[in-house]
Image: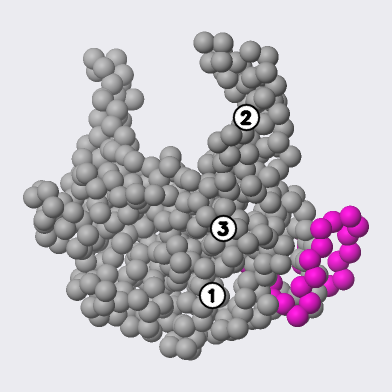
Amino acid sequence: MKNIILLFIFSFTLATILPAQIEKGDVLIKNGTVITITDGVKENSDVLIRDGIIRRIGKNISVEGIHTIDATGQFVMPGIIDAHSHIGIDVVNEGTDPNTSDVFVGDAINPFAISIYRALAGGVTASHAMHGSANAVGGQCETIKHRFGSIDPEDMKMAGAPRTIKFALGENPMRVHGEGRRIVPRTRMGVEQIFREGFAKAQDYMAEWDRYNTDPDGAKEPPKFDMKMETMADILRGEIIIHCHSYRADEILMLLDVLEDYGVSKICFQHVNEGFKVAPELAAFGASASVFADWWAYKFEVYYSTAYNAAILTRNNVVTSINSDSGELIRHLYHEAAKTQRYGDLSDNEALRLITLNPAIQLGIDDRVGSLEIGKDGDIAIFSKHPLSIYAVPQVTIVDGVVRFDINGDTEDMRMDVDPEAKISTFVDHSYSEEDRCMQGLFEFFIDRK
């Protein structure tokens, strides 16, 4: 009992004197070729990050007593962003109901996942940790910063990022529910009805609460709270961005019709292998597309696609990104972007937008990341060659001004280990912060007083 009381005091004390703060750093990058995305390419230029924010971009910046990186002969670009990932989470499908909008990926982020570090080794500073595609309406997702080295799951979350949710079309929800459990949806028609039923019920739910809030004395009690309906209602209100697993053009058009009927406008289609067939319709709706560079034919409904997909969508003014959907491919997104030049003749800047500013727009975080601009977060990737070159190798990856990957400075094994013999878990981590050490000291102080 004493230990429980002490742990409570410990938690209260930490909350009082050590409020959760994201580690932010200061760094000066010198003499690199700076690819800004929004303001051209600046040769032999410097980037100054103070307190995690880009403060200056230009030549001959000089600051005393600051960590300095010599990027002579190297290329400095915005940190890469993956709009479709499952790193940092496990068992991503809550496949127990066609609509599981009441679950939330953000409740299960694993900061120890080595996949986060491996993503950093590919220059990726942020990603969209998504629910899987077993459900027509899946769970809410989480936009994360790759702050590998922190032991707090909350540190991984990108504070202020818009809420997102996973939808899915086609074979996956049909197989899991219709074939696996013999419930709707078993057909593509049934998938559509899950969306319509969910939105219709949410409209009724909203109306019940509106009546109660308008005249609470006229009702005996408030409507029953329903987390699933709350989420669907927030989609209708425009507070949540839909990210929808999709392949076939006919189903993409179907969902656009459903969303138009219910007044929903915020959607990014994921994979969207046949997006090139309906690119004008996507553009007219204002939908965006996050695609594979050259993955298809791995199952029947993805039998037909093209490596020109990203370029065709881009030329039709659809905000397009290249995603990984893979803990391995995420390390090679700069190579995936380069394929769009090989097949679609996009410019360097257009290709790099596919893995920087465009996914930031799709996630609603482009005011903070996706380009190198004064006032934006200090999320940067430094490459040995131009990032679209097959010979490019990531050298340093910076998140919020903190070096999270250094090809020359990191140890061979960057996994964080827990020592079961230690008094308190000791983490083998090159970036173990002073705040973490202080928290450990406070914990041991209170335990010693028991």
Quick one: SS at disc 3? Answer: helix
**How is the structure coloured here?**
one colour
Residue 56 highlighted magenta (yes or no): yes
Secondary structure of the residue carrying tag 1 is helix
What kind of residue is marked 1?
Tyr
Q: Residue at x 71, y 36 (%)?
A: 437
Query: Which is more foreground, mark 1 or mark 2?
Result: 2
Left or right of 330 in this view: 374: right
Examine the rendered structure and indicate whether residue 365 appears above or below residue 16.
below
Q: Residue furthest right?
A: 64
Answer few, some or many: residues within 10 Å of disc 2's Cα (few below 14, many 20 plus, some between 14 and 19): few
Label 2 sits on what residue type?
A: Lys
Judged from this view, the residue extending furthest toward the left is 182
**Apparent side of residue 424 relative to residue 338 in the rendered image (left or right):** right
Q: Which residues lie in the magenta part?
A: 55-78
> In the rendered structure, does residue 25 fall within the stretch colored magenta?
no
Q: Position of residue 202 (x, y in %)?
A: 25, 40
Q: Amino acid at mark 3?
A: Tyr
Q: Residues within 10 Å of mark 3 (few under 14, many from 20)?
A: many
Q: Is residue 394 left or right of residue 208?
A: right
User: Which of the labelled discs sits on residue 371, or is there none?
Assistant: none
| Residue that carries the numbered disc 2 in the rendered image | 423
Mark linked to residue 117: 3
* Residues at marks 1 and 2, CA–CA distance in whole angstroms: 43 Å
Answer with the quarter of the image where residue 15 lies. top right
Q: Residue at x 53, y 15 (%)?
A: 4
Image quarter hosting the C terminus: top right
Residue 345 spot, x, y in % from top left? 48, 89
Q: Is residue 241 above or below residue 10?
A: below
**In terms of sequence position, does the residue under pointer 1 or pointer 2 come before the other?**
1
